[in-house]
Image: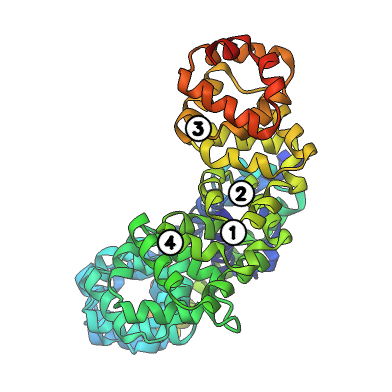
Amino acid sequence: MSRLARKAEILKLARVLGVGEADLAYLHGSDAESIRSFREQASARLFDADEARLKRVAAASKLLPIPLIALIAEHVFGDVLCARVAGLIAPDRAADLAQRLRVGFLADVTLEIDPRHVREVIKRIPVARIVEVGLELARRGEFVTLARFVDYVSSDAIKAVMEKLTDNAALLHIAFFVEDKTRLNELVGFLPETRLREIIFLAADESQDLWAEALALMNYVSPEWRKRLGELAATLDDGIVSSMARSAQAQNLWSAVLPIVGVMSSAHQQRLLKLPILGDETVLDSIVKTVDVDHLWNELIPLVPMMQPEQQRRLANLPRLRESRVLEAVLKATDVNGLWNQLLPLVGLMDEDAQQKLALAAEKLSDGAFGRVFDAVQVGRTWAPLLVLLLRMREDVRARIAPLVQKLSPESARFIAQEAGRLGVLDRLESLWDSLARLR
Amino acid sequence: MARSDFELLARELGGDPPETFHALPQDGLASLTAALRAARARQKKQLDEALTKALEHVPALMRLPVRKVLGL
């Protein structure tokens, strides 16, 4: 998600500075919040310049009647000067003036204006006029500007624009750039379900290349809306969700997909995980890479039990999941999020090298974390994979765990023995812990 | 060296950029400074042109006082 937010911010900054997106390529390592903060500083620097001179122009305009100002504004002052003066004249007068300008010219002015300076003017402009200007800007493809105004325009006006703006691609582009993401919940609520479906179908049309925008929207809305939109997509045919997965793979969008899958019902999650593309080792590796970079283990690990056995085996044996740093991050997230019973079954699917690497990483768990592992395993009865790991740990680590073994119930001890028998390691069990042997 | 580029950007911006911008490459900071400088110059030029154009519609005798009022 951070990648999409950064992309949106770079595009917005490029707009403010009057340069191309490619000119700001060096910002791709920066976080979205820093770029946004810089953009606001740059906008203020540009917009606050010459204020004294502009105030004199605004003061002079008081002497003239509105119809004459409208004429001068359009034919003499031009869009840039009007945009700068708009916030300096009385809001009622400015709104009256906006009613008298041609829609095309008003759209030109809107492109140059900083909406923060004309908040009071916008409030006074009738909805019908806002719709006219909004449609004109959408026709020109000025989505960044439209998005900037979403924070300042009334709900009624936004709803009216959305009803008239039938171009769903435009809606997705605007949503991508909206500053106040909390406003998107309200905006999505204005759309009937049929239109939401149409938007998802549009995103799935790979010639349009709109999954990034659609996924960004699904991430920015509340978890309730995210679940609803995600499930709406998941109920459509496999072609739609496969298209989403292909785009996620091609454009590195897994960090936007996982939080959506995470809030779906388990039935929808299972259906998604059965998609052939998600069984591909390269795709699984991309997912794990993204999860590692964006710290999304809490989104991926709960999905593991729903994966197909072969999918689980491929995941468990990925080279990336043999790196000690990555494994330590996996174990930490598993512990913090209470996901031991979801993670441990993978151990049985790992080859010996992968098991050994995981055991080495697990040796670094604290006593408290081992306590939580034992608590979880008693509930989930995932003793077999835990035993496999414990048998691979060094003697001193096993000794550290001995007090936890002493606390086990006789029932758990019997179950461990059964599991050890099944794994063919019963003879090694007693060498693990005398106390377990006694309990048995 | 990078620090001085950061300071040049801060000067152009009229305040310190976000702290994380210290990590930007030197030519990135210089490029941002140049882009902001160009945007400011472009805007000033547009504004001057708009005001000058507006003055052309003022009767000749009135232009000087109006020019003074508008600070041109």
Q: Amino acid at mark 1?
A: Trp
Mark carried by residue A413: none
- Residue A81 in the image: x percent, y percent? 43, 74
Check chain identity for marks 3 and 1: say if they share one: yes
**Of callouts 4 and 2, the N-terminal one:** 4
Q: Amino acid at mark 4?
A: Ala
Q: CA distance from mark 2 to mark 3?
A: 16 Å
- Density class for disc 3 (Cα within 10 Å; few <14, some 14-19, many ≥20) is few
Task: Tell us which disc is closer to us: 4 or 2.
Answer: 4
In this rendered view, identify the residue nearer to me: A362 or A167. A362
Check chain identity for marks 4 and 3: say if they share one: yes
Mark carried by residue A336: 3
- Residue A390 in the image: x percent, y percent? 67, 24
Question: Which chain letter matches label 2?
Answer: A
Check chain identity for marks 4 and 1: say if they share one: yes
Q: Which residue is mark 4?
A: A267
Q: Which residue is mark 2?
A: A291
Q: Secondary structure at mark 2?
A: helix
* Above or below, comparing residue A198 to residue B35 in the picture: below
Check chain identity for marks 1 and 2: say if they share one: yes
- Residue A5 in the image: x percent, y percent? 53, 58
Residues tagged 3 and 1 counted as in contact (Cβ below 8 A): no
**Of callouts 1 and 2, the N-terminal one:** 1
Question: Which chain letter matches label 3?
Answer: A
Q: Which residue is mark 1?
A: A254
Residues tagged 1 and 2 counted as in contact (Cβ below 8 A): yes
Q: CA distance from mark 4 to mark 1?
A: 20 Å
Residues tagged 4 and 2 counted as in contact (Cβ below 8 A): no
Residue A87, quarter of picture: bottom left
| Colour mode of the rendering | rainbow
Q: Quadrant of the N terminus of chain A?
A: bottom right
